[in-house]
Amino acid sequence: MQIKFWPVETGRCVVSSCWAMVLMLGFVPALHAGQVAPGVYLDQISNNIALEIKAGYQLGNNKILYAGLYNNGSDNVIELKTLDATSTGVSVDQDHGNVDSGQIFGLGDWCFTNDYAIMPYIKDFNVYALRYNLTSNIFDTIEVIPSQADQYTSTDCMTFNTGANLVFAANNFDAKGIDYYRSDDDGNNWSLSIAYRLNGDNIIDAFAGGFRDTHAAVNDSSIGSIYQRGNGDVETALLNFATGNLLGTRLIANGSPFIGNGLLKELDGVAMDNVCLGGANLGATLTGAFVTTDTGETGLGSIFNNAPGANPVFNFSGMDISVRNWGGTPGLYDIYYLSNTLITTQFNINTREFSNPMTFPDFPFNGNGGPAEAFAGTGTGRYHAFGVSLNFGTGGLSGTGVATIDPATAVSVPVQPLIGLPSVAVPALNRLATLLLLLTLASIGAIMLARRSG
């Protein structure tokens, strides 16, 4: 249940995106922007093909904090940019350049305190963070010193409405559990607040066939987490933020669809009033679950087809679920699901039903694969989606960009006729990326085992 700074009454409930690391080549330094279809605008913001993307939206000034992880041929590198979002596109406000490099992966979502925006990540299997001062526009990188004692494979950030309080949740590869590190001074000092372990079982991560556990601040006193047990079960837990006491667990569903399916397991979700909606990308379909936070009511089922097709850039697809209700009918929310395609549907809180799934055929990142990140911008009235492409407009430029969608004028069609998108000829880059991905993951696994036995 990762959480972003969310600009309306909605909040992040379950969020995740890709952690894969591959080696990529450099690209030409030009940028391209323009309208590509009615109500669809495309802006290239980076010459690098991102492996992971995290964006934080600042209410009031329509600023976006963009952190993109890419590989420069030898190291994974985080680049930082501030962007200006408008109703007809996104532009780079300030390029802060490369802020950290090395064995980096597992970017967590941005979270905001009164003075800072902070994004955690894993470096050398320890927990680090990129910290951006919202007043001075100066950034620095910080290390969670207590995390040096163990190896970690994913992390996430939570903030509470108590000033400078921060909590990083990190998956402890050695202990097979989740550690919650707390800072009460904007990340200057950290302490291990909660060490969450299961009785008689392990919490597994993406290196052990599970998915990246995700987390959110449910209120000012509780942390909500979703994770996968070693036996395959998907479970949520509620913990007291101050004491670390376990307030309760709930089994969401048997996790067997996640085990041995040969696909990256992706999670994402949103919070609407008293309902948390989460989804799991199983490659061919999106399986969704909702949890009513006051009664504990749960529901599970396939929402719509994902139609992955063949990805010309990456063989994996990230996942993002965003929600908007900008003065619309109470209890009726527009849901945007982004993976290989961009699909919108409506969710009725009162009936717990989805309706009218539609896809945007002119979405410029359709079928490309790779990381997914998006949000509904209150100030712009648009949906801003990040993606990677081998061809921006007619310039033939490779890199990472933002698609700005006007829901009122962009063309959408029913999802059903688009099941089984026409396959795309996969260039050599795809096969090379896959090979390098496997080699990189194998080397990471070897390093972790060596460190663990050392």
Image (tube, rainbow, N blue to C red):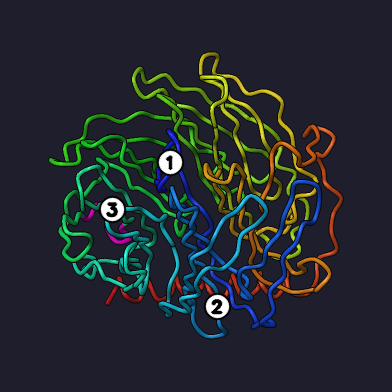
Per the image, is 176 magenta?
yes
**Which residue, given by chain and number where applicable, does mark 3 sit on?**
113
Task: Tell me the residue at 71%/73% (across/down).
Answer: 398
Type of amino acid under label 2: Asn
- Snapshot quadrant of residue 129: bottom left
- Between discs 3 and 1, the one toward the N terminus: 1
- Snapshot quadrant of residue 222: top left
Mark 3 lies on a secondary structure that is: loop
Mark 3 or 1, which is nearer the eye? 3
**Which residue, given by chain and number where applicable, does mark 2 sit on?**
71
The answer for how far apart the CA atoms under marks 3 and 2 are is 30 Å
- Between discs 3 and 2, the one toward the N terminus: 2
Query: 324 or 298, which lies in front?
Result: 324
- Between discs 2 and 1, the one toward the N terminus: 1
The answer for how far apart the CA atoms under marks 2 and 1 are is 28 Å
Type of amino acid under label 3: Thr
